[in-house]
Amino acid sequence: MAKFLLRSTFTPDGIKGLVKDGGSKRAEVATRAIEAAGGRVESLSFGLGEYDTYVVCELPDHQTAVALAIAIRAAGGVDTRVVPLLTPQEVDEAVQKQMTYQAPGK
């Protein structure tokens, strides 16, 4: 399974729902959605700042992560962004791959 960070910001309607439901219920809803998609929540936290929630989870693949984010955003209470997370070993493998790229103007 692949690991992802889901960063979300509540919409004005989402904030109203949070006030009504509370954080625990919203965390339960998010956890159930991730588990229904075949995933597992590693951590779920609320934050103060650019994003309102941070969820680290495992999902079967990138397509599932995108489908989940689309479903969450389409529901209308939060704007969710998906960030794939890599292990140090995956980065080690990536830096060993030979790539060619030409910077602009060179």
Image (tube, grey):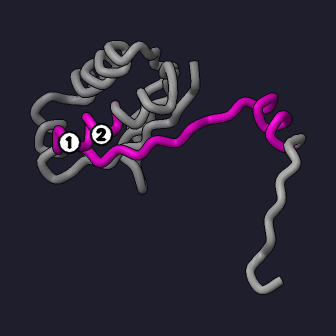
Q: Residue at x 18, y 37 (%)?
A: 18
The residue nearer to you, when weighing 16 against 29, is 29
Provide the residue span drawn in magenta. Answer: 68-95
Amino acid type for the residue under numbered disc 1: Ala
Within the image, what quadrant is residue 101 found in? bottom right
Q: Secondary structure at mark 2?
A: helix
The extreme bottom residue here reads 105
Specify whether residue 87 is painted magenta. yes
- State if disc 2 and disc 1 touch (CB < 8 Å): yes
Residue 14 location (% of width, % of height)? 17, 44
Within the image, what quadrant is residue 23 found in? top left
Residue 58 location (% of width, % of height)? 52, 21
Q: Residue at x 79, y 32 (%)?
A: 88
Residue 106 location (% of width, % of height)? 83, 83
The count of marks equals 2
95 in relation to 12, above or below: above
Within the image, what quadrant is residue 100 found in? bottom right
57 in relation to 8, above or below: above
Q: Residues within 10 Å of mark 2 (few under 14, many from 20)?
A: some
Q: Which residue is mark 2?
A: 70
Specify whether residue 50 is painted magenta. no
Residue 80 location (% of width, % of height)? 35, 44
Residue 102 disc label: none
Q: Which residue is mark 1?
A: 74
Quadrant including the N terminus: top right
Amino acid type for the residue under numbered disc 2: Ile
Q: Residue at x 13, y 37 (%)?
A: 17
Q: Secondary structure at mark 1?
A: helix
24 in relation to 13, above or below: above
